Image (cartoon, helix red, strand yellow):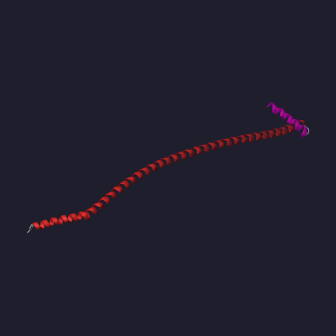
Amino acid sequence: MLEFHLSNILFTIINLLVLYAFLRKFLFGRVNAVLEARAALVKEQISSAEENNRQAVELKTQYEAKLTDARQEAAKLMADAQNRAQRAYEGKLAQAESDAKQVRTQAEAQIAAERMAMLRDARNEVASLALLAAAKVAERAVDEAGDQAMVDEFLTEVGEQT
């Protein structure tokens, strides 16, 4: 059975006190120093993480501002490009209209010139036919130079009257 001796209890208490003093002197101080160093390291890492987080938020804000500026710049460039394209289109359209008017004017002038040439040819033909008819009626020979001058004078008078 279990026996309790006062001397054993006393020696056990003394041993525990000596062990406690020894551990306190040599072990607890170092353990506390390690724990304090660890606590300081954890606080430093937490403050570093908070600083990094703050910097990340700041960089994110700057990035978003730059992104917004870039989008605005892109929109401005697109608007400028569209304006330049519209002006170029209008310029080309005006140039095409001008060219079309010029071609039309040239075509009208060419048509008028061809019409005048055709009228001249028709007058000459009519004059020749009139001379031949008149010669047959008068039954005489046609004198080209004299008769041609007379026909031209007649056609000029008729042309002025019409």
Please tell me in which quadrant of the rendered image residue 151 appears.
top right
Identity of the residue drawn at 15% across and 66% down? 12
Q: Where residue 60 sits: x, y (%)?
A: 43, 50
Residue 126 sits inside the magenta stretch: no
Q: Does any portion of residue 142 appear in the rendered image? A: no
Q: Does any portion of residue 32 appear in the rendered image? A: yes
Single out the residue that lies furthest toward the bottom. 1
In the depicted view, which residue is nearer to us: 6 or 126?
6
Query: Magenta residues, as a range?
Result: 144-162
Q: Where residue 91 sits: x, y (%)?
A: 63, 43
Residue 148 sits inside the magenta stretch: yes
- In the drawing, does residue 30 fall left or right of residue 10? right
Whether residue 108 is situated above or below residue 12 in the rendered picture: above
**Main SS class of the magenta portion in the image:** helix
Q: Which quadrant is home to the N terminus?
A: bottom left
In the depicted view, which residue is nearer to us: 35 or 150?
35
Single out the residue that lies furthest toward the top. 161
Whether residue 2 is situated above or below residue 125 in the rendered picture: below
Q: Where residue 73 sits: x, y (%)?
A: 52, 47
In the depicted view, which residue is nearer to us: 114 or 155?
114
Say how many tags the image has: 0
Please tell me in which quadrant of the rendered image residue 84 appears.
top right
Please tell me in which quadrant of the rendered image residue 34 appears.
bottom left
- In the drawing, does residue 117 fall left or right of residue 88? right
In the depicted view, which residue is nearer to us: 15 or 54?
15
Q: Which quadrant is home to the C terminus?
A: top right
Identity of the residue drawn at 11% across and 67% down? 7
Q: Where residue 26 sits: x, y (%)?
A: 26, 65
- In the drawing, does residue 45 fall left or right of residue 105? left
